[in-house]
Amino acid sequence: MPDTLHIKKTVNAWLSYWSADDDSPDRAENSWVSDELLDWTMENDSESLWLFVQEAYPRQMSERVASILAAGPLEDLLAYHGPAYIEKVEHLARTDPKFNNLLGGVWRNSMTVDVWERVQAVRNKVW
């Protein structure tokens, strides 16, 4: 099981990184976070990636940063690990309008047809 404190630290660094100006010290200080998320995606640590998304999306962030969360970590989770997580994504989308809205920023990428159709089907449905 991934370390909850490390997930929170990673989310905090990711939000600082993407909320900062390009030449800001926060950008340089938190640049490690992109490598961390890429490692989770490519090394099949999908559970850390899922926990990251769950910890990140409820936080306060600009629309720009939310779109990066959708088109980055969430899209990567579904593209690389979609069959294992689509039920969890569907459940969260049905129970949390903020998460459902976040799905609007996800593109198909390399998702299987089944996963993509299920994302599309759950997106913006009124439950």
Image (spheres, helix red, strand yellow):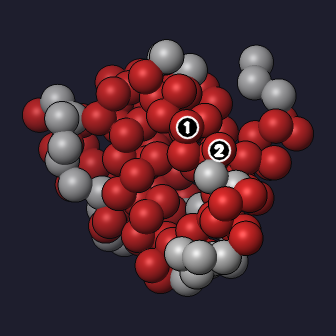
Q: Is residue 42 above or below residue 5?
A: above
Give me the residue at 57% from left, 68% from top. 18
Circle 1 residues within 10 Å: few <14, some 14–19, many ≥20: few
**Residue type of the residue flagged with mark 2:** Trp
Q: Position of residue 44 (x, y in %)?
A: 48, 17
Query: What residue is pinned by disc 1?
Result: 35
Give me the residue at 72% from left, 68% from top. 26
Q: Is residue 79 above or below residue 43?
A: below
**Residue type of the residue flagged with mark 1:** Asp
Query: What residue is pinned by disc 2?
Result: 32
Say the numbered circle drawn on residue 44.
none
Give me the residue at 49% from left, 71% from top. 66
Q: Is residue 125 visible?
A: no
Left/right placement of residue 25 relative to residue 73 reads right
Q: Secondary structure at mark 1?
A: helix
Are the residues flagged by discs 2 and 1 in contact, CB closer than 8 Å?
A: yes
Q: How many labels, in total?
A: 2
Q: Secondary structure at mark 2?
A: helix
Q: Which quadrant of the rendered structure holds the C terminus?
A: bottom left
| Label 2 – label 1 distance at C-alpha | 6 Å
Q: Position of residue 72 (x, y in %)?
A: 40, 52
Q: Is residue 81 visible?
A: yes
Left/right placement of residue 122 relative to residue 17 reads left
